[in-house]
Amino acid sequence: MSAEPAPAAAAAPPSAEQAPGPEPPAGGEEAAEHRALVLTGFGGYEKVKVQARRGGGPRPGEVSVRVRACGLNFADLMARQGLYDRLPPPPVCPGMECAGTVRAIGDGVGDRQVGDKVMVLARSGLWQEVVNVPAGQTFLMPEGMSFEEAAALLVNYITAYMILFDFGNLRPNQSVLIHMAAGGVGTAAIQLCKTVENVTIFGTASASKHEALKESGVAHPIDYRTMDYAEEVRKISPKGVDIVLDPLGGSDTSKAFNLLKPMGKLITYGVANLLTGQKKNLMAMAKTWWNQFSINALQLLHHNKAVCGYHLGYMDEEFELVGGVVAKLINLYSQGKIKPKIDSVWPFDQVADAMRQMQEKKNVGKVILVPEAPKEESKKEEN
Protein backbone atom coordinates (compact mmCIF):
# COMPACT_ATOMS: atom_id res chain seq x y z
CA MET A 1 0.00 0.00 0.00
CA SER A 2 2.10 2.89 -1.20
CA ALA A 3 1.82 6.32 -2.70
CA GLU A 4 4.09 7.61 -5.39
CA PRO A 5 5.28 10.87 -3.87
CA ALA A 6 5.28 12.34 -7.36
CA PRO A 7 8.24 11.66 -7.31
CA ALA A 8 9.21 10.99 -3.69
CA ALA A 9 12.51 11.74 -2.09
CA ALA A 10 15.29 9.38 -3.09
CA ALA A 11 16.34 6.24 -1.26
CA ALA A 12 13.03 4.35 -1.43
CA PRO A 13 12.94 1.22 -3.58
CA PRO A 14 10.72 1.49 -6.68
CA SER A 15 8.40 -1.20 -5.28
CA ALA A 16 7.72 0.78 -2.12
CA GLU A 17 7.39 4.53 -2.22
CA GLN A 18 9.05 5.89 -5.31
CA ALA A 19 8.46 5.70 -9.02
CA PRO A 20 11.52 4.95 -11.17
CA GLY A 21 11.28 8.51 -12.53
CA PRO A 22 8.79 11.10 -13.72
CA GLU A 23 6.52 9.77 -16.46
CA PRO A 24 4.88 11.79 -19.23
CA PRO A 25 1.97 13.69 -17.68
CA ALA A 26 -1.51 12.28 -18.30
CA GLY A 27 -3.91 14.08 -20.59
CA GLY A 28 -1.24 16.42 -21.92
CA GLU A 29 -0.82 18.15 -18.54
CA GLU A 30 2.55 19.67 -17.88
CA ALA A 31 4.43 18.38 -14.85
CA ALA A 32 3.91 21.25 -12.41
CA GLU A 33 5.89 21.92 -9.30
CA HIS A 34 4.14 21.28 -6.02
CA ARG A 35 4.98 21.42 -2.32
CA ALA A 36 5.65 18.40 -0.14
CA LEU A 37 6.64 17.77 3.46
CA VAL A 38 9.90 15.80 3.55
CA LEU A 39 11.55 14.03 6.48
CA THR A 40 15.19 15.00 5.88
CA GLY A 41 16.65 12.90 8.71
CA PHE A 42 15.70 11.43 12.09
CA GLY A 43 15.38 13.76 15.07
CA GLY A 44 13.35 16.76 16.25
CA TYR A 45 10.51 18.72 14.73
CA GLU A 46 12.86 20.68 12.46
CA LYS A 47 13.65 17.52 10.47
CA VAL A 48 10.37 17.79 8.54
CA LYS A 49 10.69 20.52 5.91
CA VAL A 50 8.55 21.91 3.09
CA GLN A 51 10.28 21.22 -0.25
CA ALA A 52 9.35 21.64 -3.91
CA ARG A 53 8.65 18.51 -5.94
CA ARG A 54 7.96 17.98 -9.63
CA GLY A 55 6.03 14.90 -10.71
CA GLY A 56 4.41 13.34 -13.73
CA GLY A 57 0.92 12.05 -14.31
CA PRO A 58 -0.57 8.81 -13.02
CA ARG A 59 0.73 5.50 -14.32
CA PRO A 60 -1.66 2.71 -15.43
CA GLY A 61 -3.98 1.77 -12.57
CA GLU A 62 -3.31 5.01 -10.70
CA VAL A 63 -5.14 8.25 -10.07
CA SER A 64 -3.60 11.66 -9.44
CA VAL A 65 -5.11 13.48 -6.45
CA ARG A 66 -4.98 17.17 -5.58
CA VAL A 67 -4.58 16.91 -1.81
CA ARG A 68 -6.73 19.13 0.37
CA ALA A 69 -6.06 17.71 3.86
CA CYS A 70 -3.70 15.18 5.47
CA GLY A 71 -3.91 13.26 8.73
CA LEU A 72 -1.16 13.38 11.35
CA ASN A 73 -0.77 10.09 13.23
CA PHE A 74 1.25 8.95 16.22
CA ALA A 75 3.19 6.66 13.87
CA ASP A 76 4.37 9.80 12.04
CA LEU A 77 5.88 11.10 15.29
CA MET A 78 7.65 7.79 15.82
CA ALA A 79 8.82 7.76 12.19
CA ARG A 80 10.44 11.18 12.68
CA GLN A 81 12.57 9.67 15.45
CA GLY A 82 13.43 6.55 13.43
CA LEU A 83 11.15 4.32 15.50
CA TYR A 84 8.66 3.26 12.79
CA ASP A 85 9.79 0.42 10.56
CA ARG A 86 7.22 0.90 7.77
CA LEU A 87 8.73 4.17 6.57
CA PRO A 88 11.61 4.04 4.03
CA PRO A 89 14.84 5.77 5.14
CA PRO A 90 15.04 9.56 4.77
CA PRO A 91 14.89 11.71 2.82
CA VAL A 92 11.28 10.61 2.37
CA CYS A 93 7.80 12.08 2.30
CA PRO A 94 5.70 10.80 5.25
CA GLY A 95 1.92 10.67 5.47
CA MET A 96 -0.38 7.64 5.58
CA GLU A 97 -3.72 9.30 4.87
CA CYS A 98 -5.08 12.27 2.97
CA ALA A 99 -8.19 13.51 1.19
CA GLY A 100 -8.61 15.49 -2.00
CA THR A 101 -9.98 15.62 -5.52
CA VAL A 102 -9.06 13.35 -8.43
CA ARG A 103 -7.32 15.50 -11.06
CA ALA A 104 -6.21 12.85 -13.60
CA ILE A 105 -6.83 9.16 -14.32
CA GLY A 106 -4.29 6.56 -15.44
CA ASP A 107 -4.99 3.90 -18.05
CA GLY A 108 -7.18 1.03 -16.94
CA VAL A 109 -8.97 2.89 -14.13
CA GLY A 110 -12.72 2.51 -14.59
CA ASP A 111 -14.23 3.28 -11.19
CA ARG A 112 -12.85 6.80 -10.61
CA GLN A 113 -13.31 9.99 -12.59
CA VAL A 114 -11.83 13.47 -12.58
CA GLY A 115 -13.52 15.55 -9.89
CA ASP A 116 -14.24 12.64 -7.50
CA LYS A 117 -13.65 13.52 -3.84
CA VAL A 118 -11.59 10.71 -2.32
CA MET A 119 -9.87 9.53 0.85
CA VAL A 120 -6.44 7.92 0.35
CA LEU A 121 -4.60 5.33 2.44
CA ALA A 122 -0.91 4.47 1.91
CA ARG A 123 2.19 3.36 3.78
CA SER A 124 3.74 6.81 3.28
CA GLY A 125 4.14 9.65 0.80
CA LEU A 126 0.84 11.52 1.21
CA TRP A 127 1.94 14.80 2.83
CA GLN A 128 2.02 16.59 -0.53
CA GLU A 129 -0.13 18.90 -2.61
CA VAL A 130 -0.35 16.26 -5.38
CA VAL A 131 -0.01 12.47 -5.11
CA ASN A 132 -0.26 9.61 -7.61
CA VAL A 133 -1.70 6.47 -6.00
CA PRO A 134 -3.18 3.13 -7.09
CA ALA A 135 -6.93 3.62 -7.56
CA GLY A 136 -7.57 0.74 -5.13
CA GLN A 137 -6.09 2.82 -2.31
CA THR A 138 -8.71 5.53 -2.76
CA PHE A 139 -12.22 5.56 -1.29
CA LEU A 140 -15.06 7.84 -2.35
CA MET A 141 -15.97 10.38 0.34
CA PRO A 142 -19.57 10.14 1.55
CA GLU A 143 -22.00 13.00 1.00
CA GLY A 144 -21.55 15.89 3.42
CA MET A 145 -18.07 14.95 4.62
CA SER A 146 -15.42 17.70 4.68
CA PHE A 147 -11.87 17.12 3.45
CA GLU A 148 -10.61 17.55 7.03
CA GLU A 149 -13.00 14.87 8.29
CA ALA A 150 -12.02 12.58 5.40
CA ALA A 151 -8.33 12.96 6.30
CA ALA A 152 -9.21 12.04 9.90
CA LEU A 153 -11.22 8.90 9.15
CA LEU A 154 -9.14 6.11 7.66
CA VAL A 155 -6.18 5.32 9.93
CA ASN A 156 -7.88 5.99 13.28
CA TYR A 157 -11.29 4.50 12.54
CA ILE A 158 -10.02 1.42 10.68
CA THR A 159 -7.71 0.75 13.63
CA ALA A 160 -10.41 1.28 16.26
CA TYR A 161 -13.01 -0.74 14.33
CA MET A 162 -10.80 -3.78 13.74
CA ILE A 163 -9.52 -3.74 17.32
CA LEU A 164 -12.97 -3.48 18.90
CA PHE A 165 -15.02 -5.68 16.59
CA ASP A 166 -12.68 -8.07 14.75
CA PHE A 167 -10.33 -8.81 17.64
CA GLY A 168 -12.37 -7.57 20.61
CA ASN A 169 -15.75 -9.00 19.54
CA LEU A 170 -17.39 -6.12 21.45
CA ARG A 171 -20.93 -6.95 22.57
CA PRO A 172 -23.70 -5.28 24.60
CA ASN A 173 -23.15 -4.84 28.36
CA GLN A 174 -19.36 -5.16 28.16
CA SER A 175 -16.68 -2.80 29.48
CA VAL A 176 -13.70 -1.29 27.66
CA LEU A 177 -10.57 0.55 28.81
CA ILE A 178 -9.31 3.05 26.22
CA HIS A 179 -5.88 4.62 26.76
CA MET A 180 -5.09 8.04 25.26
CA ALA A 181 -8.86 8.38 25.01
CA ALA A 182 -8.80 11.96 23.70
CA GLY A 183 -6.48 11.14 20.77
CA GLY A 184 -7.42 10.09 17.24
CA VAL A 185 -7.86 6.35 17.83
CA GLY A 186 -9.32 6.98 21.30
CA THR A 187 -11.98 9.33 19.95
CA ALA A 188 -12.84 6.86 17.16
CA ALA A 189 -13.04 3.96 19.65
CA ILE A 190 -15.40 5.88 21.94
CA GLN A 191 -17.77 6.65 19.06
CA LEU A 192 -17.69 3.04 17.87
CA CYS A 193 -18.36 1.75 21.40
CA LYS A 194 -21.48 3.94 21.44
CA THR A 195 -22.86 1.98 18.46
CA VAL A 196 -23.19 -1.05 20.79
CA GLU A 197 -25.81 -1.11 23.55
CA ASN A 198 -24.79 -0.41 27.13
CA VAL A 199 -20.99 -0.50 26.80
CA THR A 200 -19.17 0.99 29.82
CA ILE A 201 -16.13 3.04 28.77
CA PHE A 202 -13.12 3.78 30.98
CA GLY A 203 -10.77 6.32 29.39
CA THR A 204 -7.36 7.63 30.45
CA ALA A 205 -6.41 11.23 29.70
CA SER A 206 -5.10 14.29 31.52
CA ALA A 207 -7.65 16.01 33.79
CA SER A 208 -8.18 18.98 31.44
CA LYS A 209 -9.76 16.62 28.88
CA HIS A 210 -12.18 14.84 31.22
CA GLU A 211 -15.18 17.09 30.55
CA ALA A 212 -14.83 16.53 26.80
CA LEU A 213 -14.51 12.78 27.39
CA LYS A 214 -17.67 12.67 29.51
CA GLU A 215 -19.58 14.55 26.82
CA SER A 216 -18.41 12.04 24.22
CA GLY A 217 -19.59 9.04 26.25
CA VAL A 218 -16.76 8.02 28.60
CA ALA A 219 -18.42 6.94 31.86
CA HIS A 220 -15.18 6.93 33.87
CA PRO A 221 -12.38 9.30 32.81
CA ILE A 222 -9.14 8.64 34.70
CA ASP A 223 -6.19 11.02 35.07
CA TYR A 224 -3.23 8.74 34.38
CA ARG A 225 -0.82 11.49 35.51
CA THR A 226 -2.04 11.62 39.12
CA MET A 227 -3.75 8.25 39.63
CA ASP A 228 -3.00 4.56 39.21
CA TYR A 229 -5.52 3.82 36.49
CA ALA A 230 -5.58 0.08 37.31
CA GLU A 231 -6.60 0.84 40.89
CA GLU A 232 -9.25 3.31 39.71
CA VAL A 233 -10.76 0.72 37.36
CA ARG A 234 -10.82 -1.90 40.14
CA LYS A 235 -12.64 0.49 42.51
CA ILE A 236 -15.50 0.74 40.04
CA SER A 237 -15.30 -2.74 38.49
CA PRO A 238 -13.53 -5.14 40.88
CA LYS A 239 -13.37 -7.92 38.28
CA GLY A 240 -11.79 -5.62 35.70
CA VAL A 241 -12.87 -5.05 32.09
CA ASP A 242 -13.68 -7.11 29.02
CA ILE A 243 -11.42 -5.32 26.52
CA VAL A 244 -8.29 -3.18 26.87
CA LEU A 245 -6.94 -1.12 23.96
CA ASP A 246 -3.20 -0.76 24.55
CA PRO A 247 -1.22 1.77 22.51
CA LEU A 248 1.38 2.22 25.27
CA GLY A 249 3.50 -0.94 25.53
CA GLY A 250 6.07 -1.71 28.21
CA SER A 251 4.79 -2.22 31.75
CA ASP A 252 1.34 -0.90 30.78
CA THR A 253 0.71 -4.03 28.71
CA SER A 254 1.20 -6.18 31.82
CA LYS A 255 -1.19 -3.94 33.76
CA ALA A 256 -3.71 -4.26 30.93
CA PHE A 257 -3.52 -8.06 30.95
CA ASN A 258 -4.05 -8.16 34.71
CA LEU A 259 -7.11 -5.91 34.38
CA LEU A 260 -8.92 -8.34 32.08
CA LYS A 261 -11.90 -10.31 33.25
CA PRO A 262 -12.04 -14.03 32.39
CA MET A 263 -12.54 -14.27 28.59
CA GLY A 264 -11.21 -10.72 28.32
CA LYS A 265 -9.14 -9.50 25.39
CA LEU A 266 -6.06 -7.28 25.32
CA ILE A 267 -5.26 -5.70 21.96
CA THR A 268 -1.87 -4.02 21.75
CA TYR A 269 -1.39 -1.66 18.82
CA GLY A 270 1.47 0.69 19.65
CA VAL A 271 4.42 1.60 21.85
CA ALA A 272 3.71 5.22 22.72
CA ASN A 273 5.83 4.90 25.86
CA LEU A 274 8.89 5.11 23.59
CA LEU A 275 8.12 8.79 22.91
CA THR A 276 9.26 10.98 25.76
CA GLY A 277 10.56 14.03 23.89
CA GLN A 278 11.42 15.49 20.49
CA LYS A 279 14.28 13.06 19.86
CA LYS A 280 14.90 9.37 20.41
CA ASN A 281 15.38 8.56 24.10
CA LEU A 282 17.59 5.49 24.53
CA MET A 283 16.75 5.23 28.24
CA ALA A 284 13.00 5.18 27.49
CA MET A 285 13.58 2.56 24.80
CA ALA A 286 15.56 0.35 27.16
CA LYS A 287 12.99 0.73 29.93
CA THR A 288 10.06 -0.02 27.60
CA TRP A 289 11.65 -3.13 26.12
CA TRP A 290 12.88 -4.35 29.52
CA ASN A 291 9.33 -4.11 30.87
CA GLN A 292 7.74 -5.58 27.75
CA PHE A 293 4.94 -8.02 28.49
CA SER A 294 5.62 -11.67 27.70
CA ILE A 295 3.46 -14.75 28.14
CA ASN A 296 3.49 -18.27 26.75
CA ALA A 297 0.63 -20.34 25.39
CA LEU A 298 0.40 -22.57 28.47
CA GLN A 299 0.00 -19.55 30.76
CA LEU A 300 -2.76 -18.23 28.52
CA LEU A 301 -4.63 -21.52 28.96
CA HIS A 302 -4.78 -21.00 32.71
CA HIS A 303 -5.84 -17.36 32.50
CA ASN A 304 -8.75 -17.68 30.03
CA LYS A 305 -7.67 -14.43 28.38
CA ALA A 306 -6.62 -13.42 24.86
CA VAL A 307 -3.73 -11.23 23.71
CA CYS A 308 -3.84 -9.76 20.19
CA GLY A 309 -1.46 -7.54 18.22
CA TYR A 310 -2.64 -5.07 15.58
CA HIS A 311 -0.61 -3.01 13.08
CA LEU A 312 -2.43 -1.36 10.16
CA GLY A 313 0.93 -0.72 8.47
CA TYR A 314 1.30 -4.46 7.82
CA MET A 315 -2.13 -4.71 6.18
CA ASP A 316 -0.92 -3.05 2.99
CA GLU A 317 -1.78 -6.06 0.81
CA GLU A 318 -5.14 -6.75 2.46
CA PHE A 319 -7.21 -4.59 0.10
CA GLU A 320 -10.42 -6.61 0.43
CA LEU A 321 -10.26 -6.82 4.21
CA VAL A 322 -9.51 -3.12 4.72
CA GLY A 323 -11.96 -2.08 2.00
CA GLY A 324 -14.74 -3.98 3.78
CA VAL A 325 -14.03 -2.09 6.99
CA VAL A 326 -14.00 1.27 5.17
CA ALA A 327 -17.41 0.47 3.64
CA LYS A 328 -18.81 -0.18 7.12
CA LEU A 329 -17.31 3.05 8.44
CA ILE A 330 -18.74 5.10 5.58
CA ASN A 331 -22.14 3.55 6.30
CA LEU A 332 -21.86 4.48 10.00
CA TYR A 333 -20.84 8.04 9.05
CA SER A 334 -23.80 8.36 6.67
CA GLN A 335 -26.12 7.20 9.48
CA GLY A 336 -24.69 9.88 11.77
CA LYS A 337 -23.29 7.31 14.21
CA ILE A 338 -19.65 8.37 13.85
CA LYS A 339 -18.09 11.74 13.02
CA PRO A 340 -14.35 12.46 13.11
CA LYS A 341 -13.52 15.06 15.74
CA ILE A 342 -10.98 17.62 14.48
CA ASP A 343 -8.70 19.08 17.14
CA SER A 344 -6.83 21.56 14.95
CA VAL A 345 -5.84 22.32 11.35
CA TRP A 346 -2.29 23.44 10.46
CA PRO A 347 -0.78 24.56 7.15
CA PHE A 348 2.26 22.62 5.88
CA ASP A 349 4.53 25.49 6.99
CA GLN A 350 3.48 24.88 10.61
CA VAL A 351 4.07 21.12 10.63
CA ALA A 352 6.42 21.47 13.63
CA ASP A 353 3.63 23.08 15.68
CA ALA A 354 1.19 20.38 14.56
CA MET A 355 3.57 17.61 15.66
CA ARG A 356 4.21 19.37 18.95
CA GLN A 357 0.44 19.62 19.56
CA MET A 358 0.14 15.85 19.29
CA GLN A 359 3.40 14.83 20.94
CA GLU A 360 2.70 16.98 24.01
CA LYS A 361 -0.77 15.37 24.12
CA LYS A 362 -2.63 18.67 23.89
CA ASN A 363 -5.02 17.44 21.21
CA VAL A 364 -8.60 16.33 21.70
CA GLY A 365 -9.32 14.55 18.43
CA LYS A 366 -7.41 14.61 15.16
CA VAL A 367 -4.58 16.93 14.13
CA ILE A 368 -4.83 17.85 10.43
CA LEU A 369 -2.28 19.26 7.98
CA VAL A 370 -3.38 21.25 4.94
CA PRO A 371 -1.53 22.79 1.98
CA GLU A 372 -1.23 26.57 2.12
CA ALA A 373 -4.76 27.29 0.74
CA PRO A 374 -6.70 29.68 3.03
CA LYS A 375 -9.46 27.97 4.99
CA GLU A 376 -12.18 30.26 3.56
CA GLU A 377 -11.18 29.26 0.03
CA SER A 378 -11.19 25.58 1.01
CA LYS A 379 -14.72 25.83 2.34
CA LYS A 380 -15.98 27.59 -0.79
CA GLU A 381 -14.56 24.85 -3.01
CA GLU A 382 -16.08 22.13 -0.82
CA ASN A 383 -19.63 23.47 -1.22
Image (cartoon, rainbow, N blue to C red):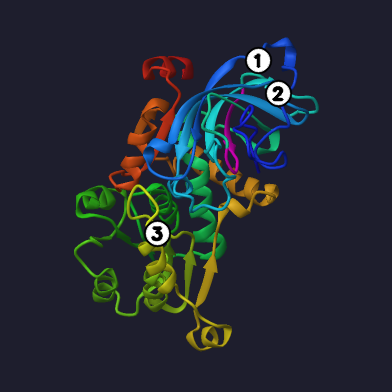
Q: Are marks 2 and 1 in contact (CB under 8 Å)?
A: yes
Please give the name of the residue rendered at 41% of the width and 50% of the height, measured from the top-left corner.
Answer: 191
Q: Earlier in the sequence, mark 2 or mark 3?
A: 2
Nearest the viewer among 20 and 343 is 20
| Residue position for label 2 | 22
Please give the name of the residue rendered at 40% of the width and 59% of the height, measured from the top-left corner.
Answer: 274
Q: Earlier in the sequence, mark 1 or mark 3?
A: 1
The answer for how far apart the CA atoms under marks 2 and 1 are is 9 Å
The kind of secondary structure element at disc 1 is: loop
Is 380 above or below relative to 17? above
The location of residue 220, given as percent across then percent down, is 26, 62
Q: Amino acid at mark 1?
A: Ala
| Residue position for label 3 | 274
| Residue position for label 1 | 31
Nearest the viewer among 139 and 54 is 54
Q: Amino acid at mark 3?
A: Leu
Nearest the viewer among 105 and 215 is 105
| Residue 174 in view | no
Q: Amino acid at mark 2?
A: Pro
The answer for how far apart the CA atoms under marks 1 and 3 are is 41 Å
Q: Is residue 200 left or right of residue 130?
A: left
Q: How many marks?
A: 3
Range covered by the magenta-colored residues:
116-124
The kind of secondary structure element at disc 3 is: helix
Nearest the viewer among 345 and 334 is 345
Is 284 above or below relative to 90? below
Is 365 above or below relative to 129? below
The location of residue 259, given as percent across then percent down, is 37, 76
